[in-house]
């Protein structure tokens, strides 16, 4: 009885959870991994402190890229209407 | 003082918005299913519209006025915190996703409460949800309305009452006549203005400050902690900042005005496209606006009132016409939030209360008249409250966001993905979430160094699971 479309939906919801975990790890890791020292010892990339560049700039660009790839590769198109139950 | 060069672009913006309202009204009048058209835009949104309306509804006065003001005082640490909002762009749509779209069509749900009602089969849930939506969203609508009026007041030099009336009449007219379709279309315009405004102001500020290197150097000389992730006063601990992922990232699923958008799009393709565009949009705005607040410090030092940082900066670093375009952005952000809230409260009253309890057999014509009437009355009520906002409303608004998340998050998520979730679990988790949220907010808002919303969200999760499992036999009858 389980609607095939729900399998797709469940898997995509789990992918969403996975992406958030990756996002959080990048954000947290770079910010506090590189930024916890004294500001006088920071390195700078393109003018920004290194932790900020990786966590907020590069990390965000990477996430957008990853989301784009994920959707292209793993997300399936399903119909939202009710007629194709029998397939 | 009146800045005409600033007022003209703003005025043009209002005219275009009016035009969209009238165009959408044509669709409303010719549609054969009034409820679905007026409150969901006929479930026809494509990817770009969906992305823009999600983003514009989510981004409010605080993203453009309040947020940059805090960054101005706390430094890069606050930009880091703001980036916890990135998941609002993809996570919400991925989790609610196709399941919500399919199920809401199957249930013929028009509102979030429709979905909860069919899923849990309980009048108590309808009443509880309707009350929390009406109370919390009415309060936050009033607060946004006040913000909009203050903004017009500060930009044009007109008095508060006139500013409020200009703002309110514009919003009311296009929302009342055009319904959800007008809201979504104006959101697309408003969302685009928000993105363009952010980019222009970011570039203008960097140039005015003499480049990133120079700005960072003067921030460092001012207070080295401005460049650290812990905030200028060291108040931003990793745990505190991380707990914002729940409030402004993940918990957003539980906001009814956001969730309802996830049942209004056309097909899978729209969803896929919206996730990508929405994430880029939210990322740009949240990163840009909050970074602008930090960069503003060397450019316009010594600002005392945090909320004036963004308007003052704009008028200082940009030529007048561009300043007008950029200042339309916070206006757009406020309008696009207010219009969604107005629609949400009105649909709750008409669909969830009037059609459920008062007159289930209302004819199409009655529903139509009621919808216009209710939207108008609520809008006018907000104006009256906003003229002289009562303490109580301001207090309620402070926890509208977290309160709604505590109430709805798990009922929606478990309702979709957990077969054993039942009405007993949902009701008890709503009550526990709301009560705990208000209690913690009153007694100890930074309990264990986390944001207020953290514990209520976890507690309502646990209660939901335990109560649902314990009442499997009782609930067995209604559940199937």
Image: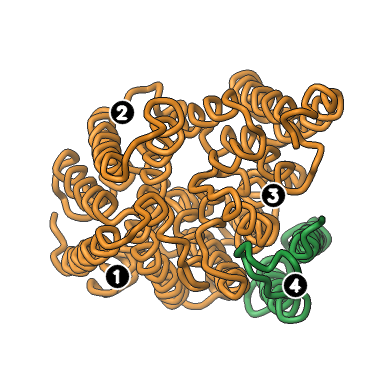
3D distance between C-alphas at marks 2 and 4: 48 Å
3D distance between C-alphas at marks 2 and 3: 31 Å
Position of residue B207 relative to residue A18, above or below, is below
Residue at x-position 57% and y-position 36%: B404
Tag nearer the camera, 2 or 4 = 2
Identify the hue of chain A. green
Q: Residue furthest front?
A: A86
Position of residue B329 relative to residue B407, above or below, is below
Which residue carries the number 1 mark? B325
The chain letter for the residue carrying disc 4 is: A
Relative side of B110 to B424, left or right = left
Residue at x-position 40% and y-position 68%: B188
Secondary-structure class at tag 3: helix
The chain letter for the residue carrying disc 3 is: B
Circle number at residue B245: 3
Which residue is more in the foreground, B293 or B41?
B41
The percent coordinates of residue B280 (x first, y second) are: 57, 72
Relative side of B209 to A54, left or right = left
> For the residue carrying disc 2, how many other residues have a C-alpha within 10 Å: few (<14), some (14-19), or many (20+)?
some
Which residue is more in the foreground, A32 or B35?
B35
Secondary-structure class at tag 1: helix
Label 2 close to label 1 by CB (< 8 Å)? no
The chain letter for the residue carrying disc 1 is: B
Relative side of B8 to A11, left or right = left
Q: Picture quarter containing residue B300?
A: bottom left
Labels 1 and 4 within one chain: no
3D distance between C-alphas at marks 2 and 1: 29 Å
Secondary-structure class at tag 4: loop
3D distance between C-alphas at marks 3 and 1: 31 Å
């Amino acid at each position: 009885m389980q609607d095939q479309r729900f399998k797709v939906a469940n898997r995509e919801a789990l992918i969403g959870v996975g992406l958030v975990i990756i996002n959080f790890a990048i954000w947290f890791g770079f910010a506090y991994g590189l930024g916890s020292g004294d500001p006088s010892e920071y390195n700078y990339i393109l003018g920004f402190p290194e932790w900020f560049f990786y966590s907020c700039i590069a990390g965000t660009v990477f996430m957008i890229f990853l989301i784009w790839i994920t959707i292209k590769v793993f997300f399936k198109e399903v119909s939202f209407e009710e007629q194709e139950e029998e397939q | 003082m009146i800045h005409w060069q600033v007022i003209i672009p703003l005025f043009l913006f209002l005219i275009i918005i009016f035009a969209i309202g009238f165009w959408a009204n044509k669709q409303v009048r010719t549609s054969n299913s009034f409820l679905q058209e007026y409150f969901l835009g006929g479930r026809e949104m494509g990817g770009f519209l969906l992305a823009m309306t999600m983003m514009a509804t989510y981004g409010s006065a605080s993203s453009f006025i309040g947020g940059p003001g805090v960054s101005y005082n706390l430094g890069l640490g606050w930009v880091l915190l703001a980036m916890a909002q990135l998941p609002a762009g993809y996570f919400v749509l991925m989790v609610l996703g196709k399941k919500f779209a399919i199920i809401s069509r199957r249930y013929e749900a028009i509102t979030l409460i429709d979905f909860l009602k069919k899923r849990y089969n309980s009048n108590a849930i309808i009443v509880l949800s309707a009350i929390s939506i009406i109370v919390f969203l009415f309060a936050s609508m009033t607060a946004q309305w006040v913000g909009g009026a203050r903004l017009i007041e500060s930009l044009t030099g007109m008095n508060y009452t006139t500013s409020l009336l200009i703002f309110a009449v514009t919003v009311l007219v296009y929302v009342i006549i055009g319904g959800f379709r007008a809201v979504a279309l104006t959101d697309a315009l408003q969302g685009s203005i928000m993105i363009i405004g952010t980019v222009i102001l970011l570039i203008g500020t960097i140039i005015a400050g003499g480049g990133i290197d120079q700005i960072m150097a003067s921030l460092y000389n001012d207070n080295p902690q401005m460049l650290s992730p812990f905030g200028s006063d060291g108040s931003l601990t990793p745990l505190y900042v991380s707990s914002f992922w729940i409030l402004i990232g993940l918990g957003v699923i539980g906001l009814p005005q956001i969730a309802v958008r996830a049942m209004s799009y056309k097909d899978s393709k729209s969803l896929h496209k919206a996730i990508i565009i929405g994430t880029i949009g939210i990322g740009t705005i949240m990163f840009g606006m909050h970074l602008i607040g930090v960069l503003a410090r060397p450019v316009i030092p010594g600002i005392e009132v945090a909320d004036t940082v963004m308007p003052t900066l704009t008028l200082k670093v940009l030529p007048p016409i561009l300043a007008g375009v950029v200042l339309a952005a916070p206006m757009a952000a406020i309008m696009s939030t207010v219009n969604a809230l107005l629609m949400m409260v009105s649909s709750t009253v008409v669909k969830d209360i009037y059609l459920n309890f008062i007159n289930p057999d209302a004819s199409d014509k009655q529903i139509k008249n009621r919808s216009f009437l209710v939207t108008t009355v609520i809008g006018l009520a907000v104006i009256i409250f906003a003229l002289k906002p009562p303490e109580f409303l301001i207090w309620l608004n402070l926890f509208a966001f977290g309160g709604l998340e505590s109430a709805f998050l798990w009922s929606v998520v478990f309702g979709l993905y957990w077969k054993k979730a039942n009405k007993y679990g949902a009701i008890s988790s709503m009550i526990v979430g709301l009560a705990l949220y208000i209690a913690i907010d009153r007694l100890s808002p930074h309990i264990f160094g986390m944001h207020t919303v953290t514990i209520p969200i976890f507690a309502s999760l646990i209660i939901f699971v335990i109560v649902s499992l314990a009442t499997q036999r009782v609930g067995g009858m209604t559940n199937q």
